[in-house]
Amino acid sequence: MHQNLRIPGPTPIPDDVRRAQSEPMIDHRGIEFGEVLAEISSGIGELVATRYEVLLLTASGTGAMEAAVVNTLSPGDRVLAVSIGSFGDRFADIAERYGAAVQRMPVEWGQNADPEDLRRALAGAEPYRAVLLTHNETSTGVANPLRELVGVVHEAPGDPLVIVDGISGLGAMPFETDAWGIDLVVSASQKAWMASPGIGIAVVGERARAAEAEARMPRYYFDFAEARRWAAKGQTPWTPAVAVLFGLRVGVRRLMAEGREATWARHAAVAAGAQAGLEALGLRLVAPEAHRSATVTAAWLPDDLEWSPFNAEMRRRGLVIAGGQGRMVGKILRFGHMGMVGADDLASAVRVMGEVMRDAGREVDPAAAADTTLRAATSPAAAR
Ligand code: PMP
């Protein structure tokens, strides 16, 4: 049965990406591979608006987060981790595991980080070496006001490094790496980039690169200096996920052909559709209106709607969405809409969700909710 994969990554893979991923294997130390690497790096660099380097690591996003930490920090460094959910906590945990003196700025799950709260957390404290931020918190469907947060960090004593988990937002939501003053941002191939899981992406700015020279956290596989040295020769230090890179090249080409603003507008429109559709099913959204993610929408599960049977029935009917993570297990559902996604996919997902709810005895109108989704996702106002 056709599966409508609507989780926040891995995302559905376009046919041309899938074909590319099944191309015959090549020598990862040959000229052809160097061309693949170079095209992906320069394409991603353009899409995220950086003039600095884009390193491609064979790892999932978490590997790229770990790489960001170990290449820039030393044990004992003071790090402020601004966590708004499960992935923010993960970033803090990684830094802590490697010996950083991590101070957490906790924010209630479902809310965004407030720039003024960040200002207060930074003021009156010993200077921090780095601040860890999440662009788009996939566990709650909340988009942080990243540009404002980064601005606040740069005004803080010691001008800490700004290290960003951009895994589920990059390539889909507005992002200006250099102009916003982001020193290091990571992402992963299975998100808006539309390829299979396996490649971590690290955009390393000037200040992050300078920090590497002093950073004493242990690193081997993820050593940026090695990645950089080999990238100059069109290679990676270790055997890379060649097939995923083939696919990622096509994903990046697709995004380049669409154009950044058009991609962002498409995601904003589809997100508006998802939000309207879930609300039409009587669900309450988790994120505050001004900070809703364009790539994943989370809604509270009503008390009398139990996740496990609800999820099992949706899956039986071909719809795959995500439940909550960590402390949100059983409390929310999450609907992914990044990468290859259009209004129709979402409308049919909302319809199936509505049908399962209706068949379980709830008063919902699946066809009307699907229609609401489609209208919200295709109205010019939604696409702004
Ligand atoms: N951070 C965010 C914001 C994510 O969405 C994810 C993946 N869901 C990760 C980190 C972890 O990435 P991975 O699962 O690829 O290790």
Image (cartoon, helix red, strand yellow):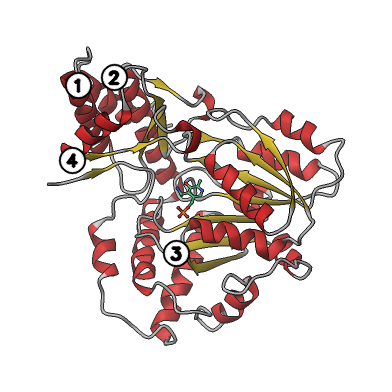
- Extreme residue in the left direction: 1
Q: CA distance from mark 3 to mark 4?
A: 28 Å
Q: Residues within 10 Å of mark 4 (few under 14, many from 20)?
A: some
Q: Earlier in the sequence, mark 2 or mark 3?
A: 3
Label 1 sits on residue? 366
Label 3 sits on residue? 199
Identify which amino acid the numbered label 2 is placed on. Leu
| Label 1 element class | helix
Circle nearer the viewer, 2 or 4: 4
**Total tally of numbered discs in the picture:** 4
Q: CA distance from mark 2 to mark 4?
A: 19 Å
- Tag 1 near tag 2, CB within 8 Å: yes
Q: Position of residue 149 (x, y in %)?
A: 68, 38
Label 4 sits on residue? 318
Q: Is residue 64 above or below residue 24?
A: above
Cβ of mark 4 under 8 Å from ligand 1: the answer is no
| Label 3 element class | strand
